[in-house]
Image (cartoon, rainbow, N blue to C red):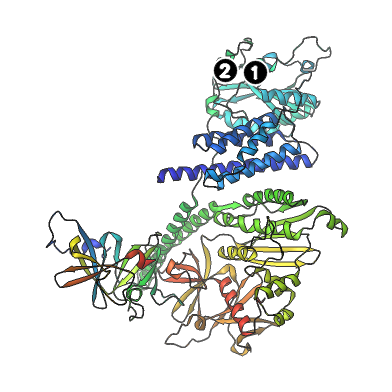
Amino acid sequence: MEGGDKARAEFLSEAQELVETLSRNLLSLEQGRAGGGRVDPEHLNEAFRSVHTLKSLSGLFGDKHMSQLSHRLEDVLDDLRLGRQQLTDAVLDLLFTSVDVYWQILTTSDAQEVRGVQEILERLEKLAPTATAESADLENFEIDQSLLAVLTEYEEHRLLVSVKQGLELFLVRVQFELATLDKALTEIKDRAKPFGEVITYLPAGEAASPDVIELDLLLASGSELSAIQGALANERISVRQIPRQKKAAARSVKAPPRNAIPKLSRPGTQVPREPAPPTHTAPLSEAAPEEHPNAEQPPAGAGLLRSVSQTVRVDIHKLDELMNVVGKLAVLRGGLSELTENARSEGHRRLGSQLGQLAHKFERSLRELQSGILEVRMVPLAQVFERLTRIVRKTGRDLNKDVRLVVTGAETEIDKLIVEELSDPLMHIIRNAIDHGIEDAEERQRIGKPAVGTIALNAFQKGNHVVIEAEDDGRGLNSDSLLDRAIALGAIAEHEAKELSRTDALNLVFLPGLSTREKASAVSGRGVGMDVVKTNIAKLGGSIELESEPVIGTKITLTLPLTRAIVTALLVQVADGMFAIPLTSISEVNALEEAQIRMIDTTEVLSRRGSSLELCRLRNLFGLTSENEPGRQFVVEVMAGTRHLGLVVDALSGQQDIIIRPLGRSLHAVRGFSGASELADERIALVLDPGALIEEASMSGSRDRGGRYLVNG
Amino acid sequence: MADTIDQITETPLRGAAADEPVREILTFSLGGEAYGVPLTQVLEILGVRTITRVPRSPPDVVGVCTVRGELVTVIDTRQRLEPGAPKALNRGRILLTNTWEGEKVGLMVDEVLGVERFSQGQIEPTAGVLVGDISSHIESIARKGNQVTVLVNLSSLTS
């Protein structure tokens, strides 16, 4: 069964990518409509292509729901492409609903539990073509009839649309080497794109040598002939305009009736249909005119069938395995360095220096390998942001609130594994913002805010971290209501509540079981809340912070490491133990000056430069002792978000790139460590989890100080 | 590789009929008692190595070590069978085994005795045989003459 599971997993992952592509193109279409009504046919085409592939894929895997949905959806998208259906808000809504149903199918393991498939199928079926049949005066152009006869339905539609828009038609004749046809064709299309749309291309059949093919590209453009010539023409490419006829209907060259046109599909055209039939079989349709000998397939057509995609799909765990190999190589490199030292100290100077050079080269290649693997793991945040755009749309509709999501920095890259885990927390934050934050339009207008609420999602890289900010312009958190809830839950006493700063009060939102709404709504507030978000972000080695102003809005900032696969760490010694602290969470390292330590209640605090830093002696925390009393100690200042803690250690032992391995099940209850790592000298260092240590310090601090929760700094 | 199972001397099969099903048991000693686990469940026998103690870990965990780059939690087997027993001194052997979740776990034992073959007739369930505070990790008792080997349930021991 393992093989089947693997195949199914691959099917699901491919289907997911296709649904994402579909969704992305629908969003582009919607944006295009909102921004002036122009719809880029490429978006429709790409949406159509994804659904088409989904159809074959789901058929292959016997996924009935997906197959039925894809089938119906393909028809609708085809109608849209061909102008038989107008792209209205209602249609777009239906398309977005289909995407949601796809997600449901993909995420529900039991086919019986998928809901809404039947309903969406019926609604899609009811979509009757709305657009009237197109007619345009093609006879105004002196187009070769043979060319018209072989246009696919889609190409004909695009031609008619172009003519209706008053564009001019041009014929670009190009000569390509057969061997490089693929590339050359893409290149000329790209170069022609700024001028207009390449509607079709056909072999012209006048090639000078058997290695060369001549093609005619039909280009619809609003530009002048000279401009197009200037940009495209060279010794192998000529451009001429298809003249308009002065006397209309002098020669009635009208497009043949649609049903008479054999639906040709040439490999390499934009639209994958069923496998391309060789042209000479096309005139099976009896009405097809025989007189177009020019419409031969490009002889190199078969070459065009080759996949243009240069990417491979790789299971992320295979990359983990490769990273483990890097770890093993790092241990070997450690051995090599040791050998070099030995050779030198035993007087083999020449051998020592040769070994040294070898070790150096080894080191460099190892770094390249490591960064190469890391690079492969990186994916843009757009992957998760696109899903959020859909959530905003849907949630906004469900709650009858008009909300707009403004995304910046979607191209910021982060480890694939982290992206996967970000989806849920971000979804929760966005839903909360719409449900609890954004007011309804009436209320917004009454207090002078724009009727449409805005959620800004902003991502950027900051050193070795990725920062994601989610900011809404809603009503902000009500700290009084948070305090009341916390008192009701027994998390804090009433007298303590009075002493809490606003920041501390806001941070109560991260307490388990605290939801600011009295009534849980269907959208959010189902008991799990910000505490779960916080836990999940912490699991990724990240931190979360919240700022909120009444009436102005709420801003939630997530700070995440770029990758979890490998981290640079500072190695420190505490008693006889070696510990690693990820460099990304260290803000400063200093020698410990006992004179600067003050006691506040039972907590040691370091005062310097006017600020104070809570100290945590790792010897005490971990109950470690050694025969030697520590000499001069060091303070490693670690941070999680804006909270800091000074870890007191005995010695610093340099930096190293480490691969963090999780601790086993028997050690899951142990707090303060994110894992362990084998060092280059084969010793094991336990990796400290600064976030957990800070949390622990503030918790015990709050107990000592009589119940102050979630203290900052 | 000096510590693989292959090098353990096998006790010749005695006392059981040739066609009777036998169980191959890897036997080891703990605090002077003989214990056994099914041979097939032991991946490897590891010799003395550096084990890194994990602060604040439960008393029945010795620490962590690496086996060819993989992190392994080493369990103090005696502590787990008999909470409160003297702590392991980290100079015995480690039986490497897989938990049912696929995690590799090392069981610290005092000494590996060898491989014994027991016929079904020589193995008795513990129920009703022993009284008192019997660890739930013990599956059955194997007897051969005067020699008693306590068979341990690995999946319960390592979870």
Observer-nearest residue: A352 or B61?
B61
| Mark number displayed over residue B61 | none
Question: What residue is disc 1 on?
Answer: A150
Q: Position of residue A1 (x, y in %)?
A: 40, 45
Residue extending farthest bottom: A595
Label 1 CA crowd tier, 10 Å (few <14, some 14–19, many 20+): many
Visible in this render: residue A664? no
**Which kind of residue does numbered mark 1 sit on?**
Val
Residue A320 visible in image: yes
The amino acid marked with disc number 2 is Thr
Q: Earlier in the sequence, mark 2 or mark 1?
A: 1
Secondary structure under the numbered disc 2 in the rendered image:
helix
Q: In this rendering, would A181 be left or right of A171?
A: left
Disc 2 crowd rating (10 Å Cα; few below 14, some 14-19, many 20+) is some
Residue nearest the observer in this picture, A357 or B48? B48
Residue B42 horizontal side relative to residue B122, left or right: right
Q: Are marks 2 and 1 in contact (CB under 8 Å)?
A: yes
Q: Position of residue A504 (x, y in %)?
A: 70, 74
Residue that carries the numbered disc 2 in the rendered image: A279
Which residue is found at the position 58% from the left and 30% from the top? A182
| Mark 1 belongs to chain | A
Residue A662 lies, with reference to residue A267, above or below; the image says: below
B80 vs A36, nearest the viewer = B80
